Amino acid sequence: MSVKVLRLLALLWGTFQFAAAGSYEGYKLYEIATETIAQRNALNALAQEDADKYNFLSLSRLHTQNARVLVAPAHDESFQAELRNQEIPFELKNTNFGRTIQTEVLQNRMLRQAKPYNGTGRLGTERYYSHDEINAYLDDLATRYPTRVFVRIVGKTYEGRILKTITITNGDGVTGKNVVFMDGAFHACEWISPATVVYAIGELVENFEAHAELLQAYDWVILPVMNADGYEYTQSASAFRLWRKTRQPLTLNGVTCYGTDPNRNFDFHWMGKGASSNPCSDIYAGPSAFSEPEAVVVRDIMHSLRDRGILYLTVHSYGSALFYPWGWGPELPDTWEDLHEVAMVGADAIRDYSGSEYEVGSSTALYGEAAGASDDYAFSEGFTLSYTMELPHGGDSGFDPPPSDIDRLVKETWAGIRAMGKKVTTKYPTPKQTLS
C-alpha cells in the first residue's frame, strides 16, 4: 500500500477519529426505520460507499431493525439529501450528540466520586465501574469465598493493565467439570457489557443458593473486561466515548493509527469478509491474527478449557440478538439446530422477564459477515455451543445506556443467561470427555 493511499485513508477516517480525539460537538444522530428490503439494501450501499462521511452505529441485515447514524455537521445536508433521494424515511434523534454524551460521561464520573468502591462488598448497579474497581471486586470475592472462588491473572493488555479471570465453583472440590466461559468488554464503548458480566458474577457467587443448579456439574470461568485499555480510554473523556478498538498503535509509512478490533483479530478466517485491512478502520483486523495481547489472552483461556468447554458466551451491545456461528460466511454448522435451541431458551426467558424481544440466528444471517470473531474461533476450537449476545440499545447512540438503565438491563440479561445455563446443564450433563 502506497504512502499516498495510506495518507488518504487516514484523512478519510479523520471524520470519526476527530470525534474520538476532539469533540462530537454539533454531530447529529439519526434513526432510520427502513420499511422494505430495497430500502435496507440502499442503506447498506450508502454505508459502504460513504464510510468516510457517515458513522453507522448500527446496521443489521434485517430491514425490520432500525439503524442509527452519527453525522458530522459538514456532511449533514448531503446525508439528508441521500436519504430523500432513495426515499428512505429517517428521524432526527439528537441535534447535538456532543453535549449529550458529555453530560452522560460527567454524570458517571460524578457518581463514581460520590460513591467510590472501597474494595469490599458487591458492586452495585447505580453506575459504571472502572477496570481497577472490577478487578478489586474479583479479589474481594476470592477472599470472602475461598472455597468457591478462584481469581487468576491471565495476562496484560498492550498498556500493561492486568487481566484477571474468576473461576466460580460450588466448592465441592470435584475437578474435571464442564465449563461455561463468559467474557465482556471486547469493544471499549460497550459499557453495559462488563456491567452485565459483573452482575452475573455477583449472582453466581453472592446469590449462590438461588443458582446452585448452575454450578452442580459446571464451573464458570469469566473474564469481565477483555479490552481494558480501550474501556478505560472511553471513560477518560467524553470525546473518546465511542472508541471501539484496543489501543496498540500501528505506524505504516509515517501514518499512525491506533487500535485493532479485537473481534476481528482471531485466527479463524482472519481478514475475511467484514474485516478491514485499513489500520484506521473501526473493524481493522490487525497486522496479523492474534496481534493483540488481549486476543491472545482469550485464545489461551479457550485452549486451556478445550477439553471441558461446553458454552462460550461473549457479551456485547447493542442489537437485542443472540447469534451463533458462522460469522465468516453464510454456511451453518452441522449442529446449528442445537445452537438455535439453546439460544431460543435465552431469548424466551428475556421476553418472559421483561418483554424485550431478541432476534436469534447465525451471525451472518443477522448482521452480515464478520470474519475473525471470537465466537467462531471458540466453536472451531471445540466449544460445543458458542454465542455472541448483543444487549438492547440504550441512550442516544445505543451504546450509552444512562446509569438509571443499568439495573433493568443487567437483570433482564441475567434472566436469559441463567436460562441458557440451566438448559446447557440438562442438555449436556456429562463431562465432555465422555460425551459420545
Image (spheres, rainbow, N blue to C red):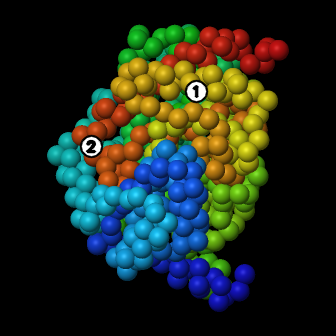
Relative placement, left or right, of 316 versus 423 is left
* Residue 49 in view: yes
| Quarter of the figure with residue 183 | top right
What x and y, as percent, mark residue 90?
38, 59
What x and y, as percent, mark residue 219?
58, 21
- The residue at which mark 2 appears reads as 403
What x and y, as percent, mark residue 19?
39, 71
What element does badge 1 sit on?
Answer: helix
- Res. 136 mark: none
Q: Is residue 334 above or below residue 174?
A: below
| Quarter of the figure with residue 127 | top left
Q: Is residue 342 above or below residue 324?
A: above
- Res. 343 mark: 1
From this viewpoint, which residue is outermost toward the right?
A: 436
Residue pictured at 43% horizontal, 25% vertical: 350
- Marks 2/1: CA distance? 28 Å
Q: In front: 16, or 62?
A: 62
Q: Is residue 191 above or below residue 31?
A: above
